Image: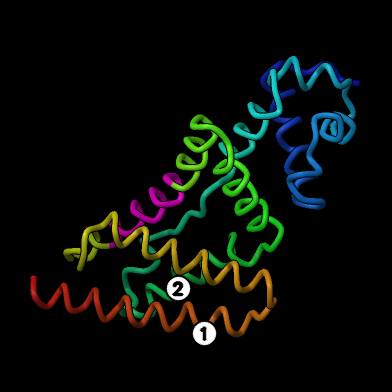
Amino acid sequence: MPRLSAKDRRVELIDATVRVAVAEGLDAATVRRVAHEAGVPLGTVHYCFGSKAALISAVADSIEQPSIDVALLEALPTDQALFAAFRAYWEQIGSDRRRQLLIYELLAHLSRGDEASREIARRLLDRAYGAVLGALRAYAEDLGRELPVEPEVLARLIIAVTDGVSLAWIVTSDDAQAQVVLETFARLLAALFDQGSASA
């Protein structure tokens, strides 16, 4: 077994936890199962994290948010730009069934826990809101527009819709329906953007 730094070992154990949870569900990611997946003694997991709760917290913190290159959207009409942004989101994370299931399982698991666990769940959501909020503000600033509603509310609305589409897709695997819903939402949102711009 190669000798790794504590930091690298923690990353290895987080990756092992994600692999188990994605393949078999979060409940299957016991400390013993994670140690086996990573090929390390059981004590190594306890040494690196202290508890399964700390390991799950680290997994939640490791979830990456999608990145959208706002500069590529500037030349497009509003509806096309927003749909392109949703399509980029979908290509990165929305259509990854197992990844989305892991996120929903993490949120449900953490929300059933104590206040510390619920804070981790809130942090995971806040990172998703923050990623969307940053893209919205950059897009509006680059185009010299005012956002039509409070930016924080708009970010939460977008996450609510995209999460809803992802959850439905997990059940149905209907790619065409997911694309139709996202395209329709992009048009509705574009009308709101254009209305806000006209009244500014």
Taking the spot 37% from the left edge, 74% from the top edge, the residue there is 81
Taking the spot 65% from the left edge, 29% from the top edge, the residue there is 53
The image position of residue 44, as x and y in percent, is 81, 18
Left or right position of 4 against 149: right
Q: Quadrant of residue 151?
A: bottom left
State whether residue 82 is above or below residue 21: below
Taking the spot 90% from the left edge, 32% from the top edge, the residue there is 36
Report the magenta stretch's main SS.
Answer: helix
The image position of residue 193, as x and y in percent, is 24, 73
Taking the spot 91% from the left edge, 21% from the top edge, the residue there is 1
Numbered disc in front, either 2 or 1: 1
State whether residue 64 is above or below residue 149: above
Q: Nearer the viewer, residue 131 or 160?
A: 160
Q: Nearer the viewer, residue 96 or 108?
A: 108
Task: Report if the CB atoms under discs 2 and 1 are less than 8 Å apart.
Answer: no
Q: Is residue 128 highlighted in magenta?
A: yes
Q: Nearer the viewer, residue 184 or 141?
A: 184
- Label 2 crowding class (10 Å Cα cut-off): few <14, some 14-19, many 20+? some
Task: Identify the image quadrant of the C terminus.
Answer: bottom left
Q: Quadrant of residue 137?
A: bottom left
Tell me the tag on residue 84: 2
- Label 1 crowding class (10 Å Cα cut-off): few <14, some 14-19, many 20+? few
Magenta region = 126-139
Q: Say which residue label 1 marks.
A: 180
Q: Which amino acid lies under the numbered mark 1 shown in the image of this protein?
A: Val
Per the image, label 1 sits on a secondary structure element best described as helix
Left or right position of 35 against 149: right
The image position of residue 45, as x and y in percent, is 77, 22
Left or right position of 56 against 150: right
